[in-house]
Image: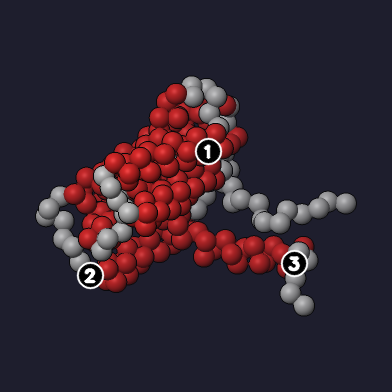
Amino acid sequence: MVVPNYVPDPIEIPDNVTEQPYAARLKFIREMQCLQIVSIMVVLGLASIPQIPVLPPIPVAVVLFAFLIVLCLIRIGLRRTPREAKVSTWTLPILLVLVAVAARTATDAGVEIWAAVVGPVFAFFYMVCCSRDFSFVGQYVLSLIASSVAIASVSLLIGHTGAYAGEALAINAAFLTYFVYDGASLLSRRRVGEQLATVVDLYRDCLNIFGFIPRVVQHWHKHRIWQLR
């Protein structure tokens, strides 16, 4: 008897990175994460420019959400074709500017956006130091510990309250979890040579939850797992 998984299998495309030799997979992971972290730094730099406007949060959120939906529709329409990665890459400059405006607006509203950068920075250090012994689990655990200690130490040094430190730690943990998990899942949805497109994926994959939940419900219904009576 075959016991089905509680969640559906991840979406895979032909000739994806997971089907490549280990050296090719490791090279892809390193290039992917380097590009993603550079994009985060670009967003942080743009958000720090005084000329970047601080706009009302709701319109900014609506525009960014709508653009992410467009990016998701592009991926769905061109999925499994080489054109998808190219088209997605063309949208990257607009995407980074929109994310920077949103980050600037959130920072002005008092959200500790800077904390989201700390975890990926330590994840980058892990990737550099681990050589060929890379592990997403190891990257996540060690980066979470190191980044949490760093944020807590900075908060104590500058005398911020517990609420401030707690918010920063929560943002760091949430984004680092997403950063590492999404990076691991992208290996089955990208081919070698599509590293730049994974930068776009880093930002639009936050909407995957809206497609994942119906897939899970359909999977449970098909295999009679946790059916409501």
Mark 1: secondary structure: helix
Position of 186 relative to 94 (above/below): above
Q: Position of residue 199 (x, y in %)?
A: 38, 45
Visible residue check, residue 146:
yes
**CA distance for labels 3 and 1:** 31 Å
Mark 3: secondary structure: loop
Say which of 155 and 99 sits in front: 155
* N-term mark: 2 or 1: 2
Position of 6 relative to 198 (above/below): below
The answer to which image quadrant residue 19 occupies is top right
The residue identified by callout 2 is 56
Badge 3: residue crowd in 10 Å (few <14, some 14–19, many ≥20): few
Q: Amino acid at mark 2?
A: Pro
Visible residue check, residue 83:
no
Q: Position of residue 208 (x, y in %)?
A: 50, 59
Badge 1: residue crowd in 10 Å (few <14, some 14–19, many ≥20): few
Q: Amino acid at mark 3?
A: Trp
* N-term mark: 3 or 2: 2
Residue farthest to the top, as pictured: 131
Per the rendering, the mark at residue 226 is: 3
Badge 2: residue crowd in 10 Å (few <14, some 14–19, many ≥20): few
The answer to which image quadrant residue 101 occupies is bottom left
Q: Position of residue 184 (x, y in %)?
A: 53, 42
Name the front one of labels 3 and 1: 1
User: Mark 3 near mark 2, Cβ–Cβ under 8 Å?
Assistant: no
The residue identified by callout 1 is 141
